[in-house]
Image: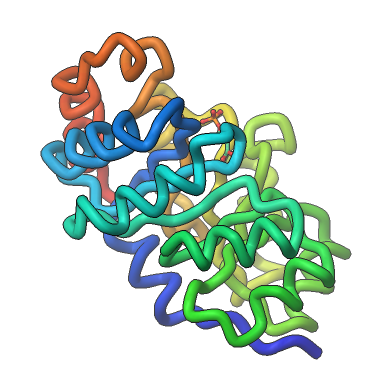
Amino acid sequence: MTMPQDKTTLLKVLQAQPVMPVVAVASASEAVNLSRALVAGGLKAIEITLRTSAALEAIRAVAAEVPEIVVGAGTILTPKQFDDAEEAGAKFVVSPGATMEVLDAAKGSPAPLLPGAATPSELMAMIEEGYEVLKFFPAEQLGGVPYLKSLAPVFQNITFCPTGGISMANVRDYLALPNVVCVGGSWVAPKDTVSAGRFDEVTRLAAEAAALTA
Ligand code: 3PG
């Protein structure tokens, strides 16, 4: 048995906004500008994914320069990535799935882990490890809102953060589910908008997302 998940710390981050912006950044300065734009729109956390070579440097810069936002690391696939993200200053860590190795790396870390799980067996395995707050990815492709609705009566203590295929067009349906704490999505910081430096537009999208009720 690994150490149980620090639900209190994690839920505090997730409950602070209905939408967690999931981003892949080109540079540390882009991440800092983006974080400031999100804060201006009312979002309180950002998940910087380890999908670009700038990710760790970006996490470090945002942690140091934008104290108004809670910076987390996403797309953590290996224990080394977990350790690197924690060392860079990530306050929470998100994984699309879960392996025993990644759960081991999370043991005793001040940065709580949000691991992904989807099938009933995966959920049961996570419960056995003391994890009850889970990512559900890729949400739309796995069955979306009806799928999460079907899980609710069976897995009564599980809370999800669904991501993947969510946008303003369907986000309200997710947020209306009692077993959803918030959703994750890249739509609040579209790649083209960010690389064009249109941070006012990011602030507008963030404000629209922040005004949703979870
Ligand atoms: C994630 O890692 O959570 C997803 O890639 C976000 O999915 P989206 O780009 O469909 O919002």
| Residue 90 relative to residue 151: left or right | left
Residue 31 visible in the current orientation: yes
Could you say which quadrant of the image residue 189 lies in?
Answer: top left
Residue 14, image x, y percentages: 39, 61
| Residue 34 relative to residue 13: left or right | left
Q: Residue at x 20, y 22 (%)?
A: 199
Q: Is residue 175 above or below residue 153?
A: above
Task: Ligand 1: give its quadrant.
Answer: top right
Q: Nearer the viewer, residue 57 or 167?
A: 57
| Residue 49 relative to residue 127: left or right | left
Q: Residue at x 48, y 80 (%)?
A: 110
Q: Is residue 144 above or below residue 109?
A: above
How many numbered tags mark residues here?
0
Q: Is residue 7 above or below residue 212?
A: below
Could you say which quadrant of the image residue 51 lies in?
Answer: top right
Q: Nearer the viewer, residue 30 or 211?
A: 30
Q: Nearer the viewer, residue 182 or 194?
A: 194
Residue 208, image x, y percentages: 21, 31
Q: Residue at x 59, y 42 (%)?
A: 50
Quarter of the image with the N terminus in it: bottom right
